[in-house]
Image (spheres, helix red, strand yellow):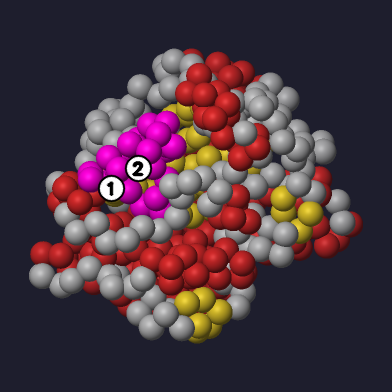
Amino acid sequence: MRTFGVEEELLIADPADGTPLALAAEILDVAAPLYGEGTGETTRGEAGTDKAGAGSATLKSEFKQEQVEVNSRPCRTAAELRAEIRAGRELSDKAARAVGARVAALATPPVFHATPTLGNQRYTAMGTEFGLISREQLTCGFHVHVSIESPEEGVAVLDRMRHWLPVLLALSANSPFWMGADTGFASYRTQIWNRWPTAGPMDVFGSAEGYQAILSELLGTGVPLDEGMIYFDARLSRGHPTVELRIADVCLYAEDALTIAVIARALVETSAAEWRQGKPASSTLTPVIRMANWKASRFGINQQLLHPLEQRPYPAADVAGALLRHVRVALTRAGDLALARAGVANILRRGTGERLQRQAYSQRRRLSDVVSAAIASTHQDGERSDAGLLSR
């Protein structure tokens, strides 16, 4: 069974008016004694690797001081990961409350103005180099790490799952507001993120050597400051034996995060099995995948998505169903099929985070109401959400 883990980037907000608060350092100081961690960086490996050590989710700084990142430990079962997600949200919010703030799983802040408050020295250097892009970069993503046996297997996985990733984006869409306005997008975070020069889908790499050659070429241009700025939709993790799926918005609901994580693991396993069976990599053109990303970003699950196998528009429910069929064998072997089916059905029925945000705004047309509703949904009782999925 492949291990998997997640990284959730969470927004630090004023509970009264929804304004982002630059309190990451203070929150990390409060949280550190609870888990014996130092400020700013976790001592663990990345989520999904066996180098993490004992314990539960931990916090670290991110690009801006108005956000924190929660790293889970590597897990083997959905039940374990569910507990990690809940624990991470609880830990970060407990620490935030101690300094007069709350954390919310919002992929973009509804109330925001460009800010230079960067998380550490590396991020400060990025701010100097990339100007307004960095000043406006306050978005929160959801990254899933899945263990792999070798870099060769990892690249084979990247090549075979690339055309399915836009579906995960649609299922996670949680960022309709930006700088006080409704953007018309379900995931405007995607549009903001794609301003970085290495962001988005990639061509087929072909081999581990091909992957490294492309990284070397990109780094040789001097545009990315380091390998950490290789922002592909999915990539090999630096220094750890995982594939990292980076395309999703942070999910408002913990149950949606769990659903996407188990599907992501199944997608990695399915892609690895195809490679072992000698099936070729995806032939979908990268510009077409970029169109699929755009459509998922614009509409989420509310209208049509591009079908990964036909590259033509189909109802979102049909495309989500195609993804579940594609990974059905892997989900079954992991014991996650019922959970994934119920989770996707729930997303299609009640919508992703973008729908709740717009509903909250429609009542009184106050962005502070959006943040208040998001805070409540971020920390809702698991017994009323994803716990029910685990029993199905």
Q: Which residues are magenta?
A: 212-237
Q: Is residue 346 above or below residue 235?
A: below
Q: Is residue 222 above or below residue 316?
A: above
In the image as oriented, which residue stretches furthest toward the right? 364
Query: What residue is drawn where x is 55% and y is 23%?
Result: 124
Residue 281 on image: x %, y %: 22, 68
Instruction: Say which mark, if any, is on residue 135.
Output: none
State if disc 1 and disc 2 touch (CB < 8 Å). yes
Q: Quadrant of the C terminus?
A: bottom left
Q: Is residue 258 visible?
A: no
Does dot 2 land on a helix, a strand or a loop? helix
Query: What residue is drawn where x is 34% and y is 37%?
Result: 219
Does dot 1 land on a helix, a strand or a loop? helix
Instruction: From the image, tell me which residue sits under label 1.
Output: 214
Asked whether 316 or 380 is in front, the reply is 316
Query: What residue is drawn where x is 60% and y is 50%?
Result: 192
Instruction: From the image, tell me which residue sits under label 2.
Output: 218
- On whether residue 73 falls in the magenta region, the answer is no
Residue 174 on image: x %, y %: 61, 56
